[in-house]
Image (tube, rainbow, N blue to C red):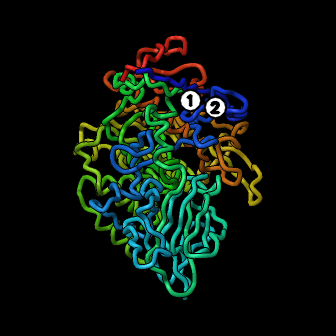
Amino acid sequence: MDTQMTTRWDFIGLSTDAKPTPTTSPKVVDGSTFFEADTSTLYFWTRGQWYEKTATGGGGGGGGGGLSSVAHDGTLTGAGTNANPLKVDTSKIAQKSDIPEFSEDHNAPSSGSNFEPVDLSYLVETVDGENWKWSGSSGEAAGWWRTNKLEFIPGYTYRFINFPRNMYQYDETGARGATADLGAGRDVTYTIPNDVHYIGFYANGTMRTGLQMYRITPTSEESEALEDANLKADHLSLTLQNLKTSSVIDSIVPLKGKTIVNFGDSIFGNFYAPTDVSSYLASYTGANVYNCGFGGNTMAVHRNANYGLFSFPSLVDGIVDNDWTAQDTALGSSWEAPETYAARLATLKSIDFSNVDIITVAFGTNDWNFSYPIDNEQNPKDTLTYCGGFRYAIEKLLTAFPQIRVFTCTPIFRTRLDENHQVIEYSDTWANGNGKKLFEFAAALKDLSSEYNIKCIDNYYETCFNKLNRTIYYRTNDGTHPNEAGRKVIAFNIANGITSSGAGWGGKTANPSDMATKTWVGQQGFLTLSDLPVYNGGAN
């Protein structure tokens, strides 16, 4: 029997390059990939266009679509199937990976008595008497009702049944929105704009039931064009079948099977999977990573009593004493807690710290901003100081769980902006109320870490954020919180700090900027393109 073999070509270039098409290059066929070396973004060609390949998942060990996703963030857990139904709290975000693909089995309402909608109560929830705001939070509104916030994949097309036409569309942070119109009718097909990641639907009048939504494109069959890749785009410049071996995968993901918990402030906690630091750290290392960041919080005990219950020493008290009564009481009170706190606390409660391998501790920017003292020589464990809070917490945590390896992370560079978003000064010269600069807190954390033989990962200097490139890594209206590119750099720096810390923890993490010509394979060194064997169709 004669077998005809079609050669599939893969391409590498920059985001500024025009992607090839079958018109410009006959080498482009269904299943071809294009890797943007400067953004670590992978695209695949199918049905006459390029699709961005994004990792899905966010609960347990992996996602769908051919690329693994092992990040945890606590916003939604489990598979979301009929066998494992999820009840989404309205303060949480329903994840894009749980939206089912449309098939002919999903009859539209026009089918009359034959309409049997899929039970999506684990994913979509409605709330009466509220609507959505531009800020990303919900608010009371008599006569209105809303859904929970839903995550979508930009550029993908979805089908909405019985949804209201009013919606707020939000960017990657979930906190900057604009109104939009889904369109008239009870059965609407809608393509998500490229800059939209989350949507909250709302309407006035009687609350609807039977809300349905399905992903239309790309289909599972189209996504299977990348099934043979099965390696993360951030780590490989080519998606060749002959690289699909366990030895390569284990080298690319040096912390595969390990569990990491990220403690920190808003740099971690204010962002959601899949674009938070924890998700990128999971991608770079292969570890299961939990985002336990609490925005606005501190290493020292926060002077606000409610916020203080979520400072690092108080979180460690809850972990070791297995008592979260105070935190639960605060969240159930009239205190207007940040919207992420309930989800982050739920994540923290779910973790068995006897099985945790690594924690990272990344506080400092708020301690500096609130002018908290760096240390107290007369009382080294004074939890009202930056260093004392760490000493108290880390000694209590490691006494209870001595197997945990601790890595501290310094605060990052920041910029002071005026109300018109113009630069006033930078953290290199900006002093707080006590005359201390942010890098002095970073230096103190380095010295403090050495007291315990703990490695300190320098995010202030080693990320290379500065006044000349800040607009690349930070949002123009925010001098404190990095954008997606900045969060990738932070995650990469942390990944390198962990994986280069000693034997038994894998090799060096791949730098996305090196991917144009080389692939990093653990401790074996760089594998150049010329070293790759020719695929013979038999390798697994």
Residue 13 showing in the rendered view: yes
**Which residue sits at x=46%, y=62%?**
93
Q: Earlier in the sequence, mark 2 or mark 1?
A: 2
Q: Residue at point 41% right, 49% down?
A: 58
155 vs 233, nearest the viewer: 155
Q: Residue 319 vs residue 310: left or right?
A: left
**Residue 388 in sight from this viewpoint:** no
Q: Quadrant of the C terminus?
A: top left
Q: The N terminus lies in which quarter of the figure?
A: top left
Instruction: Check contact, mark 2 vs mark 1: CB within 8 A.
Output: yes
Q: Position of residue 500 (x, y in %)?
A: 42, 24
Disc 1 residue type? Answer: Pro
Q: Mark 2 belongs to which amino acid? A: Asp
Q: Label 1's element? A: helix
Q: State which quadrant residue 52 falls in.
A: top right
Above or below, 525 relative to 383: above
Q: Residue at x 60, y 70 (%)?
A: 167
Q: Secondary structure at mark 2?
A: loop
Q: Is residue 515 left or right of residue 251?
A: right
- 309 lies above or below 522: below
Residue 82: image tag: none
State how far apart marks 2 and 1 are (Cα).
7 Å
Q: Which residue is mark 1?
A: 512
- Residue 428: % across, % down: 66, 40
- Looking at the image, residue 101 sits to the left or right of residue 484; the answer is left
Q: Which residue is mark 2?
A: 38
